[in-house]
Image (cartoon, grey):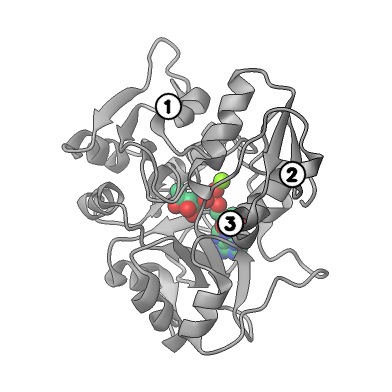
């Protein structure tokens, strides 16, 4: 199996005609597509060979499970087991949108998808192209962010192709992503809900809809969200974070979720040694943004 179409560049498809992309996915070829959070590298959830390709293309560790993207609640029922009241409350309030909900998986979902866990993360994206693609294929698509593992997630197609050009046959251009950081991940499989990855759907918003407390992941014991243990969102440049204007030396950047990853990639393209970031009040209030920043700077893992 060759994944490198070395003599070939990835063909960029405009989002109005999805037929080539749908055909490729049905043929077991992963496709890059836009979502409202970041670009994804998709494959049909039931196609094990295609799912394997995703791990190879990204250089993704096999113990890191994938998110299933759906276009209807019927899709959720095909892959999730015992969908309860809490699940429907969240789906009703936040879907389509940047929230991934972890539930028990159906046996039909290949173990590779969930990295051997008995669970599956499900999200219904709000991006029209993503939903039309899933609908056109007629099955949920698993899709990690469309970057090489460990690099900042791509929020425009050119950032994705910087990593994956020639390794994927087709990529759909949907412009810049609205949200700019990955979905919130919440698990409903333990006694009380656990926030595994902060995102633009906040913990407070989740608690309000659920009518109960949402926990942070336990500090010890088994790792619940394998993806969070790897150094993520990391540029080559050193990231220096300042909270006080007095600490700034020279040029700095005020971070916002929508532009953070593009800025980190841009700095790397310019071979900047150190990126100085000034977190103003607005940035400090954004828990998801601060989470990614602290990871990019290596202060949390
Ligand atoms: O916004 C997003 O979620 C984007 C777009 C493409 O939809 N996708 C994305 O996928 O960020 P990825 O693979 O880069 O991140 C998936 C995260 C990882 O931290 C992974 O460990 C966690 O979700 N995850 C997925 N399934 C899980 C499961 N069954 N149990 C625990 N964590 C899970
Ligand atoms: Mg990722």
Q: Which residue is mark 1?
A: 158
Q: Nearer the viewer, mark 3 or mark 1?
A: 3
Q: Which residue is mark 2?
A: 245
Residue in the image at 48% along x and 27% along y: 164
| Left or right placement of residue 196 versus residue 157 in this view | right
Q: For mark 3, does the 10 Å Cα neighbourhood hold few (<14), some (14 to 19), or many (20 or more) residues?
A: few
Residue 227 appears anywhere in the view? no
Depth order, front residue of 237/215: 237
- Tell me the SS state at disc 1: helix
Residue 8 in picture, x, y percent from top left:
38, 14
Q: Identify the mark at residue 31; answer none if there is no mark.
A: none
- Tell me the SS state at disc 3: helix
Residue 1 in picture, x, y percent from top left:
48, 27
Q: CA distance from mark 1 to mark 2?
A: 33 Å
Q: Is mark 3 within 8 Å of ligand 1?
A: no
| Left or right placement of residue 216 versus residue 28 in this view | right
Sequence-wise, the earlier of marks 1 and 2 is 1
The outermost residue toward the top is 7
Depth order, front residue of 170/129: 129
Query: In the picture, residue 42 is in which quadrant?
Result: top left
Q: Is residue 102 above or below residue 49?
A: below
The outermost residue toward the front is 246
| Left or right placement of residue 232 versus residue 91 in this view | right
Residue 195 in picture, x, y percent from top left:
61, 70
Q: Is residue 181 above or below residue 5?
A: below
Do the numbered discs 3 and 1 sit on residues whose CB atoms are within 8 Å?
no
Sequence-wise, the earlier of marks 3 and 1 is 1
Residue in the image at 42% along x and 64% along y: 108
Q: Identify the mark at residue 282; answer none if there is no mark.
A: 3
């Amino acid at each position: 199996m060759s994944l490198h179409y070395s003599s070939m560049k990835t063909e960029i498809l405009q989002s109005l005609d999805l037929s080539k992309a749908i055909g490729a996915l049905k043929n077991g070829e992963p496709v890059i597509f836009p979502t409202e959070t970041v670009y994804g590298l998709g494959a049909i959830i039931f196609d094990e060979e295609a799912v394997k390709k995703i791990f190879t293309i990204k250089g993704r560790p096999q113990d890191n499970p994938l998110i299933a993207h759906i276009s209807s609640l019927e899709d959720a029922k095909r892959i999730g087991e015992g969908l309860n009241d809490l699940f429907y409350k969240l789906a009703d309030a936040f879907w389509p949108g940047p929230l991934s909900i972890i539930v028990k998986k159906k046996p039909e979902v290949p173990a590779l998808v969930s990295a051997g866990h008995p669970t599956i993360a499900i999200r219904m994206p709000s991006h029209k192209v993503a939903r039309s693609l899933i609908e056109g294929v007629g099955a949920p698509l698993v899709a990690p962010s469309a970057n090489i593992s460990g690099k900042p997630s791509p929020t425009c197609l050119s950032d994705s192709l910087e990593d994956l050009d020639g390794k994927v046959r087709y990529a759909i251009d949907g412009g810049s992503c609205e949200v700019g950081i990955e979905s919130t991940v919440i698990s409903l499989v333990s006694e009380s809900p656990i926030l595994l990855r902060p995102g633009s759907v906040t913990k407070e918003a989740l608690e309000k809809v659920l009518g109960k407390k949402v926990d942070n992941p336990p500090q010890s014991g088994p790792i619940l969200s394998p993806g969070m243990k790897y150094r993520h969102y990391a540029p080559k440049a050193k990231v220096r974070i300042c909270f006080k204007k007095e600490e700034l030396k020279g040029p700095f950047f005020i971070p916002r979720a929508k532009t953070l990853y593009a800025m980190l990639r841009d700095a790397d393209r310019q071979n900047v040694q150190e990126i100085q970031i000034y977190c103003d009040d607005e940035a400090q209030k954004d828990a998801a943004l601060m989470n990614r920043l602290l990871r990019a700077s290596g202060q949390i893992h």
